């Protein structure tokens, strides 16, 4: 594999900076990724050269901005192999996408006693909307447990699928454990029981090639900032026949065919769910980020990150009292850990003083922390620009921190 890590690192301006006088080692990619210059420039170019509101404008700037925005939608469609650009709704990110599905699709289909199924490894964003809906509708939230390795218990899942189950939402890749769920097989099980499925792809999309037609999911959502794009923009894939049967939960300009004081008729397709002036520059930057990773190749990125995962895991296992939370056979480039009784926040603070950026806490997965009996973890998460040399620096910094805290 010809993986030009020096070139890729040079594409990201922030990686050349120092923190506390030490080179930045950025291992917090699970929270957000850094941005290549091409993405930054695309946003600057929009504001400098053709800033305008989109759709309905006949002047040159509006036409150019509208084309760029809709071209971004097509870029997202191609990246995940959706059947049509009409199946891609731009949202503020994964969280808004999940809320949109909860209220525009499921809310009017749920009755008392119905069940919504999620898993024990979900991010709070894939718990709270369903929990809230269950409280409102008198429905029941059921949970698929995980085993000690951090893998879904498929036998338990099969038992939980029942005629009462109306919806199943699960994460493709756990943001805390790094577990890669066998999404296609899980979706097949749910569909065999006539259950609609949403996949939270926030942590999968930067680490692997996703094909929604192959998965055959009904909904798939992810955020641009997890895959080297801007914050505040994301995508929700919806099968077109389902999308056309959904009602908007936010209404306003850009969503309508006609308005009178007696009746409003909404447009067909994704614009029905994009009320108001959208994040135009975000969509443009989103598309540029997808162009960037596709130029490198998602398979190449996955192989590079897997090598880092294996290398770092072996190094960390040699540290006394090290406990890695999440040891699934299939993992993305995420390692969550605790060392003895040392609090993760203390470790994270000392690592930061040595230029190592990691995430500490419960990672918006408090039920999962409870499952593993820890208050939180330190999380290392890799991106396409990370190196073995950075792993070595992290291990040295970690050993120093442990000596200071022991």
Image: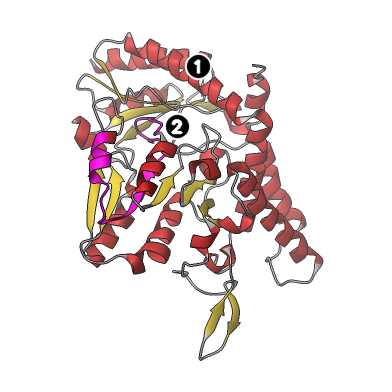
Q: Earlier in the sequence, mark 1 or mark 2?
A: 2
Residue found farthest to the right: 60
Front residue of 250 and 190: 190
The residue that label 2 is drawn on is: 28
Q: Residue at x 22, y 62 (%)?
A: 135
Q: CA distance from mark 1 to mark 2?
A: 17 Å
- Residue 384's disc is none
Check residue 406 for magenta coloring.
Answer: no
Front residue of 130 and 42: 130
Q: In this image, 217 relative to 368: left or right?
A: right
- The part of the chain drawn in magenta is 155-181
Residue found farthest to the front: 192
- Residue 307's disc is 1
Q: Quadrant of residue 350?
A: top left
The kind of secondary structure element at disc 1 is helix
x, y percent for residue 127: 30, 50
Q: Quadrant of residue 97?
A: bottom left
The kind of secondary structure element at disc 2 is loop
Asked if marks 1 and 2 touch (Cβ < 8 Å), the reply is no
198 is higher (above) or lower (below) than 51: above
Q: Quadrant of the C terminus?
A: top left
Instruction: Please indicate, yes or no, whether residue 153 appears anywhere in the rendered image.
Output: no
Q: Quadrant of residue 148?
A: top left
Front residue of 336 and 261: 261
Q: Residue at x 37, y 22 (%)?
A: 329
Residue found farthest to the bottom: 262
x, y percent for residue 26: 49, 28
x, y percent for residue 217: 46, 47
Q: Residue at x 37, y 62 (%)?
A: 106
373 is higher (above) or lower (below) than 244: above
38 is higher (above) or lower (below) than 138: above
User: How is this picture coloured?
Assistant: secondary structure
């Amino acid at each position: 594999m010809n993986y030009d890590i020096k070139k890729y690192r040079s594409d990201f301006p922030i990686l050349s900076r120092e923190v506390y006088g030490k080179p930045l080692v950025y291992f917090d990619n699970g929270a957000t990724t850094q941005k290549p210059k091409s993405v930054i420039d695309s946003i600057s170019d929009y504001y400098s050269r053709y800033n305008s509101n989109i759709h309905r404008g006949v002047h040159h700037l509006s036409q150019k901005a509208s084309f760029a925005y809709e071209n971004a939608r097509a870029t997202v469609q191609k990246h995940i192999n959706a059947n049509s650009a009409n199946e891609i709704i731009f949202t503020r990110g994964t969280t808004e996408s999940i809320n949109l599905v909860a209220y525009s699709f499921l809310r009017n289909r749920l009755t008392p006693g119905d069940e919504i199924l999620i898993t024990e490894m979900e991010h709070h964003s894939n718990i709270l909307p369903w929990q809230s809906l269950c409280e409102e509708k008198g429905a029941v939230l059921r949970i698929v447990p995980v085993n000690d390795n951090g893998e879904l218990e498929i036998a338990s899942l099969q038992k939980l699928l029942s005629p009462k189950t109306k919806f199943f939402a699960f994460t493709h890749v756990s943001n805390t454990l790094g577990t890669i769920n066998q999404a296609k097989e899980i979706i097949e099980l749910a569909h065999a029981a006539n259950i609609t499925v949403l996949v939270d792809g926030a942590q999968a999309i930067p680490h692997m090639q996703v094909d929604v037609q192959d998965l055959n999911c009904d909904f798939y959502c992810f955020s641009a900032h997890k895959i080297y794009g801007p914050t505040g923009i994301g995508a929700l894939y919806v099968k077109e026949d389902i999308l056309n049967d959904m009602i908007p939960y936010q209404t306003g300009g850009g969503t309508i065919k006609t308005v009178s004081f007696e009746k409003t008729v909404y447009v067909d397709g994704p614009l029905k769910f994009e009320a108001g002036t959208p994040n135009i520059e975000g969509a443009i930057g989103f598309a540029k980020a997808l162009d960037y990773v596709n130029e490198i190749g998602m398979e190449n990125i996955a192989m590079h990150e897997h090598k880092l995962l294996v290398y770092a895991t072996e190094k960390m296992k040699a540290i006394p009292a090290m406990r890695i939370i999440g040891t699934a056979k299939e993992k993305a480039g995420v390692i969550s850990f605790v060392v003895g009784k040392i609090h993760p926040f203390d470790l994270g603070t000392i690592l930061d003083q040595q230029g190592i950026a990691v995430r500490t806490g419960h990672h918006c997965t408090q039920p999962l922390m409870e499952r593993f009996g820890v208050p939180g973890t330190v999380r290392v998460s890799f991106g396409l620009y990370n190196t073995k040399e950075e792993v070595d620096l992290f291990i040295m910094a970690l050993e120093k921190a442990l000596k200071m805290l022991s």
